[in-house]
Image (cartoon, rainbow, N blue to C red):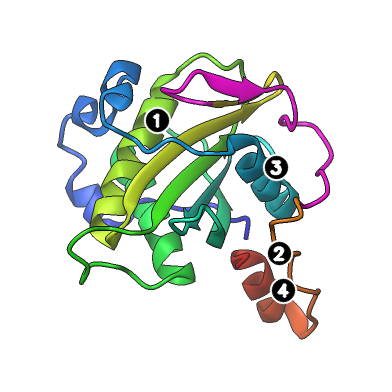
Amino acid sequence: MTFGFAPSSTASLSSSAPSATRMLEPAEWAAAGIPLLRNPREVVSGLHARHHPEPATAIVAVLDPDERLRASASFTSRRAPADGWLFRNALLAQLRRVIPHDLRRRTPVRTAVLLYCREGDDRWTEEDGAWMWGLRDACTLHGLRCGAYITLTRDGWQVFGEGRGGRRPHATSAPEPFATSQAPPPPPRTGGVASDVLRRAAAR
């Protein structure tokens, strides 16, 4: 689904917290022990084909231990100062919408990854740092392992902290065919605006 999000009341009450504490530097992210993706290009291509992201679109996806996609959702963030708290709230809302939490497990078994399509080149920005912080915190609150943070720009895609990337897909490329290991998207449903919103809200 593609929609904007506004600051929640909780976020507003916490706006006095230093924004620096809601952002991760590349070195901090690289040292966090983020699990490596076995086939990042397949993950990126699959999410790109499902959600057709445009700049300012975030896609959060949940993978099982075999790196199969279990759920994903996309949304568009409004132009605003980068704030990991707001990003965390938005990601957590999407996770709660598309998949049950795993908080009862002693150890997380599913992993959430984030693909963010944005303008600019592939160099780290403060906005990236805020998304990293938001992803890590949302995963903790939903009982998931924090997985890769991936950017999609006109130059291609890259997995932060791993030094892996590729030229396709990129921010303006047409979706590629689904990988053979990925299930095809559900067939279109009709039923008015509400049905269309729900159909686009989550790809399982």
> Where is residue 102 shown, x and y percent of the image?
29, 68
| Image-quadrant location for residue 22 | top left
Q: Nearer the viewer, residue 5 or 200?
A: 200
Q: Nearer the viewer, residue 97 or 139?
A: 139
Left/right of residue 7 with respect to residue 108 in the rendered view: right
> Where is residue 113 shown, x and y percent of the image?
46, 45
In the rendered structure, which amino acid carries the disc numbered 2?
Ala
* C-alpha span from label 1 to label 4: 31 Å
Callout 3: 10 Å neighbours few (<14), some, many (20+)? some
Residue at image point 26% right, 30% down: 32
Residue at image point 71% right, 64% down: 183
Q: From the viewer's perspective, is residue 124 above or below residue 95?
A: above
Quarter occupied by the N terminus: bottom right
In the rendered structure, which amino acid carries the disc numbered 1?
Pro
> Where is residue 77 shown, x and y percent of the image?
52, 44
- Which secondary structure lies at badge 2? loop
Q: From the viewer's perspective, is residue 169 above or below residue 179?
A: above
Q: Are marks 3 and 4 in contact (CB under 8 Å)?
A: no
**Residue 183: image tag:** 2
Dot 1 or dot 4, earlier in sequence? 1
* C-alpha span from label 3 to label 4: 23 Å
Q: Which residue is mark 1?
A: 81
Callout 2: 10 Å neighbours few (<14), some, many (20+)? few
In the rendered structure, which amino acid carries the disc numbered 3?
Ser
- Which secondary structure lies at badge 3? helix
In the rendered structure, which amino acid carries the disc numbered 4?
Asp
Residue at image point 56% right, 30% down: 151
Q: Which residue is mark 4?
A: 196
Q: Is residue 171 magenta?
A: yes
Looking at the rendering, the stretch of residues picked out in magenta corresponds to 159-178
Q: Which residue is mark 3?
A: 45
